[in-house]
Image: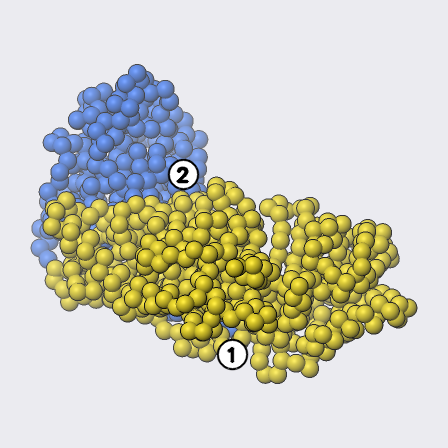
Chain colours: A yellow, B blue
Amino acid sequence: MYNNLMIFSWNITGEAGFGITTIGLTMAKICARHGLHIWDYAEYPSLIRGGYTSFELAISNTEVQTLSTYINILVCLRQDGFDNNKSRLNQNSIIIYDQDEVKIDGDYIKLPIPFKQIRTKHKAYQVTTNVISMGVTMAILGWDLDSFNTLVNEQFKSKGQEVIDYNIILAKEGWESANNFLIQNNDIKSKIENVLKQYEFIGNHPSNQGGNETSLIMTGNEAFSLASIIADCRAYFAYPMSPASNVLSVLAGWAKTSGMLVRHVEDEIAAVSEALGSAYMGVRSSVGTSGGGFALMVESLSYAGIAEIPLVIYIAQRPGPATGLPTWTGQGDLLFTVHAGHGEFPKIVLAPGDMQEMIELSVEAYNLATIYQMPVIVLTDRLLAESHSTVSSQWLHMFQESSKINNGKLVSKTDQNPYLRYRDSDDGISEYLLPGLQDGVHWQANSYEHLENTHTTEDASEVVKQVNKRARKMVKYLETDYKGPKIFGSLEDTEIVFVSYGSNIGSIKQSMIELQQVNKRTAYIHFTHLYPLLSKIICPLFEHKAQYVLVENSGTGQFGKLLRQECGISIDKSILRYDGRPITVQQIVNSIITIK
Amino acid sequence: MNTNTTEDGIKISLIKDLSGHEPTWCPGCGNYGIVRAIRIALANQNLKPSDIFVSFDIGCSGNMNDFLNANSMHTLHGRAIPTAIGMKLAHHTKPVLVVGGDGGLYGEGGNHLLHACRGNHDITVVVHDNMVYGLTTGQVAPTAFKGYKSRSTPLGIVETPINILSLAISQGATFVAQAFANDAKHLAEMIQQGMQHEGFSLINILQPCVTFNKVNTYEYFIKHSYRLGVDYDPTNAELALKTAQEMLMERFPLGILYRTTSRLPFHMELACLKDKALIHKDRFTEYEILERDMA
């Protein structure tokens, strides 16, 4: 099998509620601060305490958005942490564990650490094992504890010096304990050194790396939140639902500083209704949810469509149907999203693949919603929504500087008399007077079919006029703002062309590199603007002499169906996954190698 | 502007400005009295169509969207209250009214009403309570009395009526009143006081549906309703709850049942709305402060 040397993986597993993710994030920050790229992936059950939790960090000196096939360091605080990950361990995997608590059979590089004894010595709760294990990790990697101590000082500032010192002492105990063990067990020490030698970027003390490039780490949920601020969104309404809940907490946490109105309302219907109310007034507004919550919002989506109200909807998919798998990932809501809403009305669906795209497309979503006066959906999934990734600060600041607010035809004063809010026009977009700003002019956002002057109508020709007007907005969008897919590799000279969208990009791009190593030439068509689709740009991409393969985190290959529906393109090979787990490099590579 | 006034001091020209299309309601419908009362209440406060914001529900009541000139949203059935809250919070210096029926606001959107009371959102909710569904041609409403026979309950409704006055008071509404559609002057006074009240105000309007409700007629309401006396103390919550219970015995008190100024309206509790309305605020661009946690 491929032992990929670009990604070093560190995995900590333990009990839910024991700070597994917290310490994982600390590790991620230490890496990011030293110029390394990270991607993380947490598995946790839909409960608060007990149960198996794991946090895996993929570390690289280049962009990374997938897990490696094998785990390099496994911090195993629970027996099933070993049992569940056996298939991803090999003789070069380093396992950190307490012999009194976990039993490890097999040929691995074992590093027993007396966590329990250390805790007893310091009268520490079990929850502190994560901190001790950080010390052990640092020792194995040959790093000192400076970075860790700095982070602890920052993170626990509000909790007082005592808490800071306590954490520093516990990490130091772990660090010393590991180093003492390695001094006494030279064979293990040299095995570890041999492993690390293969990953130069991590084996060296990372403080030597990085240069001027600094980076932030953020999840997709955080990236959407930040993009909302950049796009001047002033009102966010939500009812918590995994995996989108964090947008609500992040924006609420920032609200005191940003001045944003952040409302946790009684249900998703209220969320979208309040958002429509504030959007009507001219305030950029959005809502965030997952499939089930979006199902409740669908009627209002249709209202936004007919009344032509700008609205951004963030959907982080999880596997359904119904309650499904709340804390796992999937892409099973694509067609539901694209087709959501009764009646015929225009909408735009965008899907980011990585953090940078999440920021870019989310800001774009707010502008498009305003320009075209329609609902725009940012569709992502649990994998991108909750995983952290490094984002270059330099890039981010340049992006922030260059981001423009485009208000389209929104005006605070009109010259029309009488004012016709829904006046027919070539591009279908009518002047939108912000209500209440001009003395003597009023209009209604009507959920009934209406005349140009906003009054209700059932007149056949007026109905056709408005339906056509709204439909022309889609034509205008396709001509003006639609962006075709990104192409990775060359479509001219390839055997395999992957076709996908969203967070699968990480595993697909890594698979391309690994397939290159076994002389398989591949390319990738990555879609970001999912709906509507523009055939004249897309169809030529599918005329090459290659095997096209749809890659999707769903059971029915919904993007393939959408391509067929909108562009008449059929893809007969697909790599699908629908068990709540993300598509892996291993799955893709194995599938391609076995394609005849 | 022509400022001719009637004997009561109502500005005729303003009433005219507020009047939209000719209503399409059935002759004799209680809605005529309600729209007249709303216009009087607005004119009395010197509010023009461009000054006010109305969130209309769906139904005969909501069809007022074309008969009352205002900045407005003709929303979805049941969603007029949350839509109004969004409008209010975006531009909180503007007065916001909700106009809807018992079906939309107490049935389909009942959950929103509870939470709007809790939040004490500064909106005025004007409810057409005719105990029947008009626009869908005569099905039972959540305010109908047990046993009421309708097209959806030919053998009589099993449920007892929702007691909206006590419900609103118990959930935190800070202004709860009841009026009769036939008495536009009193109704206008209730609406005006509701609008001037800082906080959530509910005005439940007893409204005969001449086409579909042959039980709760003008005569019925005249017989079963009474005006709260001058000695009635609307700041007494206990008394208000007790008075609201009379509804279940087909005795309908008219007037302000409950009023309290003990709680701030929602928007006044929000730091982000202290200085300026959301719509008028400057764009926030100090991203570095927010990014600190991500470094």
With B113 as the anchor, is A554 left or right in this view? right
Amino acid type, callout 1:
Gln
Are dots 2 and 1 on a single chain? no
Residue at point 30% right, 33% down? Answer: B102
Front-most of A498 and A592?
A592
A526 to B39, vertically: above or below: below
Q: Can residue B247 be seen in this view?
A: yes
Q: Is residue B286 visible?
A: no
Disc 2 target residue: B111
Residue at point 39% right, 68% down? Answer: A544
Residue at point 51% right, 56% down? Answer: A575
Residue A235 percent across, percent down from the top left:
40, 58
A538 to B260, vertically: above or below: below
In the picture, residue A154 is in which quadrant? Answer: bottom right
**Secondary structure at numbered mark 1:** helix
Q: In which quarter of the image is the C terminus of chain B?
A: bottom right
Front-most of A325 and B36?
A325
Residue B232 percent across, percent down from the top left:
35, 31
- Chain letter for the residue marked with disc 1 in the picture: A
A314 to A363, vertically: above or below: above
Disc 1 target residue: A394
Q: Quadrant of the N terminus of chain B?
A: bottom left
